[in-house]
Image (cartoon, rainbow, N blue to C red):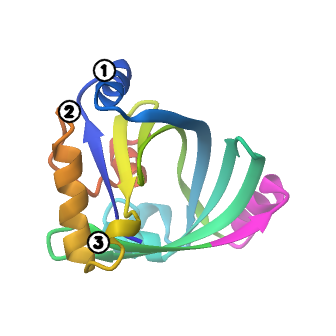
Amino acid sequence: MTEICVQVRDDLAHVINMLKSLDYVFDERYVIHDIYYTTLKKSDLKTVDYKNLLNQSLIIRKIDGNSGINTYIVFKNKTIDNKGNVINEIKTKLKIDDEEKAKTIFTNIGMTCWCDYINENIVYKKGEIALTIQNIKNLGVFLEIEEYPSIENLSNKDKFEVLSNLVNSLGLNLNDDYSAKKPYLLLNRGE
C-alpha cells in the first residue's frame, strides 16, 4: 500500500474548510492511540535511522471509531526510497483484547517504549479518494492519503507521485516531506 503523509502548516479549521470548498464530504471521525515499543536500548534510540527503528518495533494500537474500540499489535514493514520517502508499507495486525497485558509482556521481555501518542483523524471523501486529516497534540496537523483503486496498478514510485500531486492541488500550506514520520518526529522532539 502506497500512501503519503504531509504536515500542514494551516490550522485544522482552515484545512476542513478548504476540503469542503473542493467538494470533499465528511465521512468519519476516529481516534488512534499508538504506543511504540522496540528491542533497542533507550540510549540507541536517537542514533538509529527510522527504518531500522521500525524494523525492531511493535505497536500497540487502539482505534476508537464507528465500530467501537479495537486494539491490535501492529508491525510495519516500510519500503523507503533513496530520498527517504516511504513508497510502500505492509502492516501486519493481530487483534488483542487486553492492552495492559500487552504492555506488561513487552516490558517484561525488555522492550522499551519510545513513543506514545494520540492521533485524532477526520476523513473526507470525494469519489474514490479519501483524505484523512490527522491532528496530533504537540506536533500539529497532517494530511494522509492512501492509494485508491484507479491507481493501484501503477508502480509504487508513480503512485507516490500521483498522491503528491493530488495533495499539492488542494491549495494548502504544506511542509516539503511527503513521508512525515510522526512517531520519529515526536521522538526527536523529546515528547
Which of 72/170 is in front? 170
Residue 51 visible here: yes
Residue at point 83%, 59% (across, down)? 101
Residue 139: within the magenta?
no
Residues at marks 3 and 2 touching, judged by CB atoms closer than 8 Å: no
Q: Which amino acid does label 3 sit on?
A: Ile
Q: Which amino acid does label 1 sit on?
A: His
Residue 95 within the segment the image draws in magenta: yes
Q: Position of residue 98 (x, y in %)?
A: 84, 57
Q: Is residue 42 left or right of residue 23?
A: right
Give the image quarter of residue 64.
top right
- Label ID, residue 172: 2
> What is the quadrant of the N terminus in the image?
bottom left
Q: How far apart are marks 3 and 2 (CA)?
A: 22 Å
Which amino acid, by three-letter code, is at mark 2? Leu
Residue at image point 42% right, 54% down: 128
- Comes first in the chain, label 2 or label 1: 1
Q: Identify the element where label 1 is drawn.
A: helix
Where 177 falls versus 28 (above or below)? below
The C terminus sits in image quarter = top left
Nearest the viewer among 82 and 53 is: 82
Give the side of residue 96 with respect to residue 135, left or right: right
Kindly indicate whether the residue at mark 1 contacts the one at mark 2 (C-beta within 8 angstroms).
yes
Residue that numbered label 1 is attached to: 14
Q: Where is residue 18 in the image (x, y as percent from the top left)?
A: 28, 26
Image quadrant of residue 172? top left
Magenta span of residues = 93-109
